[in-house]
Image (cartoon, rainbow, N blue to C red):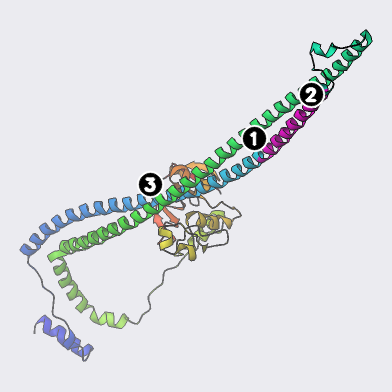
Amino acid sequence: MTRWVIMAVAALVLFPGVASAVPPPPPNPGDDAISAGRQQADAKAARVGELTSQLTEAEARLQRLTDDVAFKMELVNKARVDLEAAQDEAVRARQDADFARTEADAAGRAVDDARQELDEFAAASFQQGSTIGSLSAYFGAASPEDVLAREQLLAAVGDAGLNALDDVERARSEKSNKDSAARAALDLANQRQAAADQARKDADAAQQEAVRAQQDQAGQAAAIEGDKARVEGELTQALNAVEGLEGQRAQYHQWLDDKRREEEAALNASQPSARPVVTVPGGDGVETVVGRALAQLGVRYSWGGGNYDGPTVGIRDGGVGDSHGDYYSVGFDCSGLMMYAFAGVGVYLPHYSGYQYNAGRKVPLSQAQRGDMLFWGPGGGTHVALYLGGGMMVEAPYSGSSVRIAPVRYGGIMPYATRLL
């Protein structure tokens, strides 16, 4: 009786009704076929290495695009703040201009009053039959006493006229000064308004550029994901080729072993398996921060979302974030997640990664410890994540994703980490 017959009979005795379902043995290829399969596997392995490299580069390009979008969105915030400041300055400058114009108008009225007073002196002098400063005023005097009286009268009228002239000149000078102040204030108001208009244009341009960048990034990300799927498919094919005939032989021997252990497996099938023991980290400050961040794993990304109490509804960004519904969905952005994590130990951070970068002590990136914050982009204004140690971090990465644990990305990373605890 052959071994196969013996095994079939044993199966029939031990497991009635199932012997007819026992599959036939898999192929057992010869050595020549295995040798040829190994050569094919080597060729596929080389191709797998190429595809893995291409995939790494594609993912790096995707991350650079994501970082660029995040940086441009922060520029939108900056331009909006600059616009508000310029508009406030323009309002104050126009108020100063209005005040200066009011004073200039008052000075103009003073000039008119002084001119009218001078005209009255001139008319009075003419009615007395004389002209100030003219010798004709002395002609026709009847006596030396009359000449002396006329001289005293003309002197009095002349002095009053000169005083009026002084008042006119003084008022005219004041009007000129007030007019100059009014023009200067108006010029300043126009400059402030021009600055406000330019800030508005800069904000609009930055917003449009960010939207275009996010739209381009979305298209490129889709293409990269397609490449990734194709690479993974080729990688699977390569792994299957590496297994080749060796895999068939291994399956053949495994089939034999499975049959020999069939009875033992049936007896042990009902025994419960051991479960792993999960340990919880300590409760110090760093672990409190890390624990609060990790508790949010899987919470969706929402641009502008998150505060000291947890996830919140995001805000509009005019681009990809809006297309993902961030402005009506509850979640975190990168800096919002840090706000929530550190609020657990009484550290209240502002909702901007650039300010968070300067909120604590700088340590070289090579000395980063668990609980330190890592930053990307100029001044840390592109992205922030919480370092977990061992080359891993927790972050809220970008619209369409969720809070996750990921390996630290060193492209574009700031050379210093920020330590708060």
Residue at position x 82%, y 17% in the image: 130
Looking at the rendering, the stretch of residues picked out in magenta corresponds to 98-124
Under tag 1, what secondary structure?
Answer: helix
Residue at position x 28%, y 79% in the image: 265
Q: Earlier in the sequence, mark 2 or mark 1?
A: 2
Q: Residue 75, percent across and down?
A: 46, 47
Q: Which mark is residue 410?
A: 3
In this view, the mark in front (2 or 3): 2
Q: Which mark is residue 182?
A: 1
Residue under label 2, please give it: 122
Quadrant of the image containing the N terminus: bottom left
Q: At label 3, which amino acid type do we have?
A: Tyr
Q: At label 1, which amino acid type do we have?
A: Ala
Disc 2 to disc 3, C-alpha distance: 90 Å
Residue at position x 75%, y 28% in the image: 115
Drawn side of residue 263 relative to residue 212, left or right:
left
Q: Residue 270, percent across and down?
A: 34, 82
Drawn side of residue 379 relative to residue 253, left or right:
right
Disc 2 to disc 1, C-alpha distance: 34 Å
Q: Residue 293, percent across and down?
A: 50, 59
Residue at position x 79%, y 13% in the image: 134
**Magenta run includes residue 117:** yes
Label 3 close to label 1 by CB (< 8 Å): no
